[in-house]
Amino acid sequence: MERYAINGGKPLYGEVCISGAKNAAVAIIPASLLVDGPCRIENIPNISDVISLKYILTYLGATIKYESNNENAMIIDTSGVNSYTATCDRVKNLRASYYLLGALLGRFKKAEVVFPGGCDFGFRPMDQHFKGFEALGAKVKVEHGIIKVSADRLKGSRIYLDVVSVGATINLMLAAVKAEGVTIIENAAKEPHVVDVANFLNAMGAKIRGAGTDVIKITGVPVLRGRATYSIIPDQIEAGTFMIAAAATKGDVTVRNVIPKHMESLSAKLMEMGIEVIQGEDWIRVKYNGQINKVSIKTLPYPGFPTDLHPLTAVLLCLADGTSTITEGVWDSRFQYVDELKRMGALIKVEGRMAVIEGVGKLTGAPIKATDLRAGAAMTIAGLCAEGHTEVFDVKYIDRGYEKFDTKLRSLGADITRVTD
Ligand code: EPZ
């Protein structure tokens, strides 16, 4: 069991470099199953979800090597993969295991993957993934906790997603890139990591157009060849995490290696709160200016306010002047963080999908736990801005999506240490 021991009340100052995007990396690594020959991918975050996927692909027969003295660059050669069955335990460690379905189906016309794991936000259906696979000509069945997909032929089709789904959009791109003919995905997700996966596949010879809009057109090609090096985009949610931490600790932090356009919804909300936000070409500076105004936020698919920043923003709003609200527009239940914050003096009421957050002026340190990846990051920020000592338990959740999180925070002046019991 590992935990963070934090002494709060210290503003964060300085600069921090943002790592590669988790939700792009966990899709691009399985996507390499569609590529003939080795491909080199850089700016991969060194996080446990990536390590799990490295293990799973190796288990399937791939050879994956980190570049010498560069833990953020991998050379992946999947030519040795001769199995379409991903049923090892690690598959349950992460939600992104579902991408093995689209990638293995696209390569072998067959895939068998145990149900994925991931953060618990209530029911996380996959009906849109299955609807898309069937539209491409595959049969889908679930037996003994294993999702089995198979097709004699994969033929392009027009697929309308009933729900805007990041996972389904990417999974169907993976299944369709080598299908016969043209596939159109309508009502597609537009997240930056959806675009990054499309750009990776196109760099390897795919023909995908429209990623980043709600209509994506995929023209099937017979082969994808490992050609260029592909560099993963910066992590929008990690960048947002440090921007919020700067404001919540009343500090002044510049996040580097970011794409400001990806941060627009958060930057706008921080400015609405009275926080100073200055942006450059690949950096954003966030500076506390003596106030945190109350606001109302609704989380939505991109370009709306990211659901993954919901718990983190809730911590900041505990310190605002007045009552704020966050309405969760993506997940049925993403409020597990509320009970943990209440231990620190937060006054939050959950009414349906809305959190009503009183500005209590300050939080006090307490023993709390990470209930999922982003809630864990939120609890850490709560400890940083609280008065007194905080212990955050179950930091393994945080390791899934943040590279060197406590190291980066210490470089900004945080009094945080990682303790192994
Ligand atoms: C991805 O999850 C991310 N995970 C999540 O980030 C993120 O919260 C989510 O997208 C939304 O942005 C990864 O990329 C690995 P969805 P995913 O399919 O793909 C419903 C993190 O912290 N839905 O976009 O599982 C679903 O219930 C994680 O990095 C269906 O109804 O999310 C939800 O209400 C946490 N049927 C909504 O769509 C389906 O077949 C959005 O889900 C699929 C989804």
Image (tube, rainbow, N blue to C red):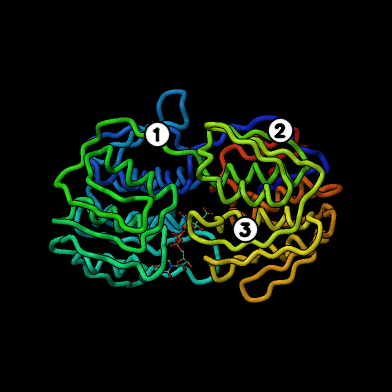
| Residue for badge 1 | 231
- Tell whether circle 2 marks a residue whose Cβ is less than 8 angstroms from ligand 1: no
Residue 250 pos. (x, y %): 78, 42
| Residue type, mark 1 in image | Ser
Of mark 2 and mark 3, the one earlier in the sequence is 3
Instruction: Estimate how packed mark 2 is, as few (under 14), some (14 to 19) or many (20 or more) residues with alpha carbons within 10 Å.
Output: many
Q: Secondary structure at mark 1?
A: strand
Q: Amino acid at mark 2?
A: Leu
Q: Secondary structure at mark 3?
A: helix
| Residue ID at (41%, 54%) | 190
Q: Is residue 233 left or right of residue 327?
A: left
Labelled pair 3, 1 in contact (Cβ < 8 Å): no
Question: Upstream in the sequence, badge 1 or badge 2?
Answer: 1
Q: Residue 166 falls in which quadrant of the image?
A: bottom left
> Residue 401 versus residue 62: which sits nearer the camera?
401
Q: Earlier in the sequence, mark 3 or mark 1?
A: 1
The residue lying at 16 percent from left, 43 percent from top is: 223
Structural crowding at the residue carrying mark 1, measured as other residues with C-alpha within 10 Å and reported as few (<14), some (14–19) or many (≥20): some
**Residue 38, percent across and down?**
27, 34
Q: CA distance from mark 3 to mark 1?
A: 28 Å
Crowd tier of the residue under label 3, counting other residues whose Cα lies within 10 Å: few below 14, some 14–19, many 20 or above: many
Q: Residue furthest bottom?
A: 352
Looking at the image, can residue 21 be seen? yes
The residue labelled by disc 2 is 412
Q: Quadrant of residue 62?
A: top left
Secondary element type, mark 2: loop
Quarter occupied by residue 133: bottom left
Amino acid under disc 3: His
Could you say where residue 185 lies in the image, as x and y percent from the top left? 29, 60
Q: Which residue is mark 3?
A: 310
Mark 1 touching mark 2, by CB under 8 A?
Answer: no
- Expressed as whole percent of the image width and height from the top left, the position of residue 132 reads 28, 66
